[in-house]
Amino acid sequence: MAFDIEEALRRFPLPDGQQDMTVNRRQCATALDVSEPMITRYLEQGLPVLSRGSNGQAYEFQLSEVYAWKMWRDDATRAQDAAAEQAAMQMRLLFRNDDEDDPAAQVLTAQQIAQEADADYKRNRAAELRGELARVSRVRDLIEEMLIEFRSQITTLVDFAEMEFSLEPDQVEKMQKRCDSVLVSTRHNFQRAFPVGAVSQISSGSAREADEA
């Protein structure tokens, strides 16, 4: 379902006692407990904004809209994950009836398959609430936020080392190549682990090019 700000505000009003205010980009990041670069990613995903910063003007966000959008997004993610998990469980159980090599294998009816899939889902959901399981989407968001900070730090590392340790030009070049290699390797490893939605925060350009961009 497409995001509807009016519907989201109705479904997810601010909690009692929470004052609704207009905030800037930094304050919005604080409110959502994320980094400022993550706000850029959220904006690309549809985070409501009262005014976009330009020509020295700051971004402006309404806390009630920000809260409603985040709650709507998280709720939609949970529903999508739950549906996918349920479908996967049902398909897994279907294959139990295909084990022709095992004459002792139990043949399950469609109702039994559905009941067992539902039981598996409830067990996994309970484990998630206890903090023993985490959804892939949440892990991906957390790692992407960490990668944003990692990229920010490594792109300034070469210049810092050059000034701090008075490196020679050939040493600077070697260090820059090493940093570039780390960025590329990190990006590839992330894409292998989370193939859905390629990471854009770890670029394949050089560390200095990224810092100057």
Image (spheres, helix red, strand yellow):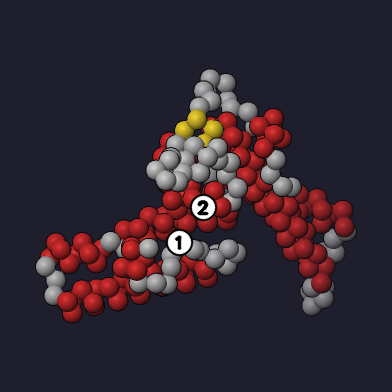
Q: State the image coordinates of residue 148 (x, y, percent, origin top left).
A: 41, 56
The answer to whether 44 is drawn above or below residue 16 in the figure is below
Q: Residue at x 52, y 56 (%)?
A: 140
Residue at (52% x, 36% y) in the render: 61
Name the residue furthest bottom. 170
Residue indicated by mark 2 = 41
User: Between 73 and 102, which is closer to the camera in this rendering?
Assistant: 73
Residue 171 quadrant: bottom left
Helix, strand or loop under label 1: loop
The mark that comes first in sequence, 2 or 1, is: 2
Q: Mark 2 falls on what kind of element? A: helix
Q: Residues within 10 Å of mark 2 (few under 14, many from 20)?
A: some
Quadrant for the C terminus, please: bottom left
Is 155 rendered above or below residue 34? Answer: below
Residue 64 falls in image quadrant: top right
Q: Are marks 2 and 1 in contact (CB under 8 Å)?
A: yes
Residue 166 pos. (x, y %) = 11, 68
The residue sitting at 57% across, 44% down in the picture is: 47
Asked if residue 140 is positioned above or below residue 129 in the image, the reply reads below
Is 129 left or right of 205, judged from the image as shown?
Answer: right
Alpha-carbon distance for marks 2 and 1? 10 Å
Q: Is residue 179 left or right of residue 27?
A: left
Query: In this view of the protein, which residue sits in the foreground, 169 or 135?
Result: 169
> Which residue is disc 1 drawn over?
201
Judge left or right: residue 130 versus residue 97.
Answer: left
Name the outermost residue toward the top.
17
- Number of other residues with Cα within 10 Å of mark 1, as a class: few under 14, some 14 to 19, many 20 or more: some
**Can residue 210 be seen in the rendering of this structure?**
yes
Q: Amino acid at mark 1?
A: Gln
Q: Nearer the viewer, residue 90 or 119?
A: 90
